[in-house]
Amino acid sequence: MYKLWNALQEAKNYKWVELSHSLNNDSPYWAGIPEGSVKLAQTCYDWGNPMLDCLIQTFQFPGQFGTHIDFPGHFVKGRELSEQYGVKDLIFPLCVIDITEKVKEDIHYAVTPEDIKAYEAKYGPIPDGAFVALYTGWSSRWPDMDALSGTDADGNENFPGWSLEALKYIYEERNAAANGHETLDTDASVLAARAGDLACERYVLDKGKLQVEVLCNLDQVAPAGAVVIVSYPRIEGATGLPARVWAITE
């Protein structure tokens, strides 16, 4: 009788996949954020209070904590922050680019336009407004911060990621709306070191695009044909926020 209720029942016949990590007080975060910045589920109103018998908690965390969304104002002064995005801006066709075999051979591997073109040859062009996720297998290292960073004996970071050329392809040739990855940063570590900056992340956000970092379970999603939904607390003025992200996939 009601079209949307019927559509929901139909959607539940598909596979729903959690793409965000669970968080607690021991979850890792970037070393540049001051120690003690995470205090989750701290009791501020306890059971047994005569005013009302219930439990209320407070939550303190950095915007860039766990699986999180970044807004343009994170890297570009004066650009869009969290309140600029409506609910229709947070659901996307999902494309998953699998470079796991190349990462096994080279942990510094940066995805190339050729990798994306090979994906398109198999699955079709990346559609307008797509969320393009990079699957590297890196999420298996969560929640070990040193493993996520690929920290070596000299304290250097080593992990795969995006190249600027690949990002330009998905945004300038294919008009994607957002990108995502399992690593802590957009840029492959070797490219970030060479540039002395997170040039890839800066490019994405300067284009007014969105990105989600520290994704997981991308291996459980069809490479093409899925839909991804990104949600976050409706807090104004945020440069980034922890996100609940899930895919509906065939």
Image (cartoon, rainbow, N blue to C red):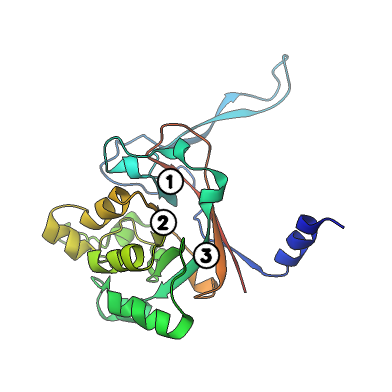
Residue on which disc 1 sits: 26
Amino acid type assigned to the residue bearing label 2 in the image: Pro
- Asked whether the viewer can see residue 26, the reply is yes
- Secondary structure at numbered mark 1: loop
Dot in front, 3 or 1: 3
Give the left or right position of residue 241, taking residue 199 as reference.
right
Q: Which residue is painted at 23% across and 70% down in the image?
A: 108
Q: Are marks 2 and 1 in contact (CB under 8 Å)?
A: yes
Amino acid type of the residue that numbered disc 1 sits on in the rendered structure: Asp
Disc on the earlier residue, 2 or 1: 1
Q: Position of residue 246 (x, y in %)?
A: 56, 59
Q: Check disc 3 and report its element: helix, strand or loop.
A: strand
Residue type pointed to by label 3: Pro
Location of mark 2 (residue): 143
Residue drawn 29% across the image and 39% down it: 33
| Image location of residue 197, percent across then percent down | 17, 52
Residue 82 vs residue 41, the one in the foreground: 82
Q: Which quarter of the picture shows residue 132?
A: bottom left
Q: Position of residue 101 (x, y in %)?
A: 35, 81
Going from N to C along the chain, the mark reached first, 3 or 1, is 1
Mark 3 highlights which residue? 93
